[in-house]
Amino acid sequence: MRIVVGMSGGVDSSVAAYLLKKQGHEVIGVFMNNWEEDGVCTSEQDFRDVRAVCDVIGIPYYSVSFAKEYMDRVFTHFLEEYKRGRTPNPDVMCNREIKFASLMELALSLGAEKLATGHFAGVEKREDGKYHLLRAKDENKDQTYFLCTVTQEQLSKAMFPLRDLTKPEIREIAKNAGIPVYQKKDSTGVCFIGERNFKQFLSNYLPAQPGDICTPDGKKVGRHDGLMYYTLGQRRGLGIGGAGTCERWFVVGKDLKNNRLIVSQGAASALLYSDCGRAEDASWTLGQPPVSPESELLCKARFRHRQPLQDVVLTTDGKSVTMRYLEKQRAVTPGQAVAFYLNDECLGGATICE
């Protein structure tokens, strides 16, 4: 097949391209630049790495800018969520709206049958004729959380060559193949923020509104720099002392109406834990909910990347999801994604709203 590989300049996508070429496919590497502001992310160096890797593998490569699409479909939503006092996850939306939309459209225009990436995940067409999104062998690296809102149509044209490999195995393959980025450090965080201070970055786009830090009973214990800078469960950067005890302070809520940050002392504070929740804007990988509106489904959920799978009972009308946790969950954060699982399969995901 002719296959386009989304290449980041890292070892994972490089090995994905190498393995596909070794299998006899016609492989084309495409590097995406989704942010045009200078000095923020490492796109120039990353593209140099892509060129070097493609030269070693012996495949053609392109660089393409989806900066406008990223701004319209991902970053604008990112800012709107922060305005609402929530903590968004742009990587989940980037996969659905950019990698498996704009990049996939480009791949098809180049005559490719599939778009492959270096995600730790799998996709498999089963007897039901559907394409199933599967967890990776390396559970610590599994990235289906970030792919949980990818659609059935997108999955039908997706390939994930690294599903059965661990990270050490990938680096060893790269080393033996002479791929120059075999020791390259994994990228972390959101590309458009890069190594800069997050608070400084966000202040360039949203006006900060300082306010009071209060306990749940209304006692003022400090001042915050703007609610957008804080997230549920946060303990660092609050700038308040022990207030007579050695217990640390944690963010347990936000009062948007009065611009107050609500904090409580102690990592075991009951206000950090919940036994149920709700999510919205659900997307199901098989194209339909895994359970009828009248029924409950006992399954697993992940509220953040690399979190161990948690037992939940969900009900859904298709778009909104109600979740009951079999064990209390800590700091389930509005704006973040929740991904749902049954056995080895990711069923889909939604945005936590409460």
Image (cartoon, helix red, strand yellow):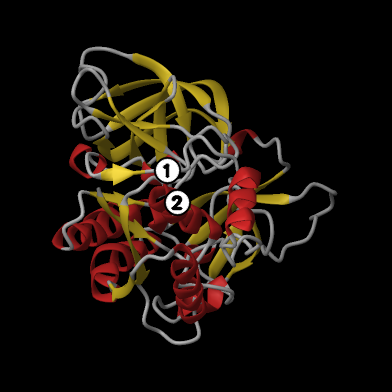
Report whether 241 appears left or right of 330.
right
- Relative image position of residue 166 (x, y in whole percent): 59, 40
207, above or below 18, in the image: below
- Answer whether residue 41 is visible to the viewer in this image: no
Quarter of the picture containing the C terminus is top left
Q: Are marks 2 and 1 in contact (CB under 8 Å)?
A: yes
- Residue 39, relative to residue 208: is it above or below? below
Q: Which of 121 and 207 lies nearest the eye of the viewer?
A: 121
Between 211 and 137, which is closer to the camera in this rendering?
A: 137
Quarter occupied by residue 205: bottom left
Residue at (53% x, 32% y) in the render: 137
As helix, strand or loop, the secondary structure at mark 2 comes to helix
Q: Residues within 10 Å of mark 1 (few under 14, many from 20)?
A: many
Report the disc number at residue 16.
2
Camera sees residue 327: yes
In the rendered structure, which disc, 2 or 1, sits on the residue that comes first in sequence? 2
Query: Circle 1 — which element?
Result: loop
Q: Which numbered circle lies on residue 161?
A: 1
Q: Residue at x 51, y 60 (%)?
A: 260
Rendering quarter of residue 84: bottom left
**Residue 329 screen position, x and y as percent:** 56, 31
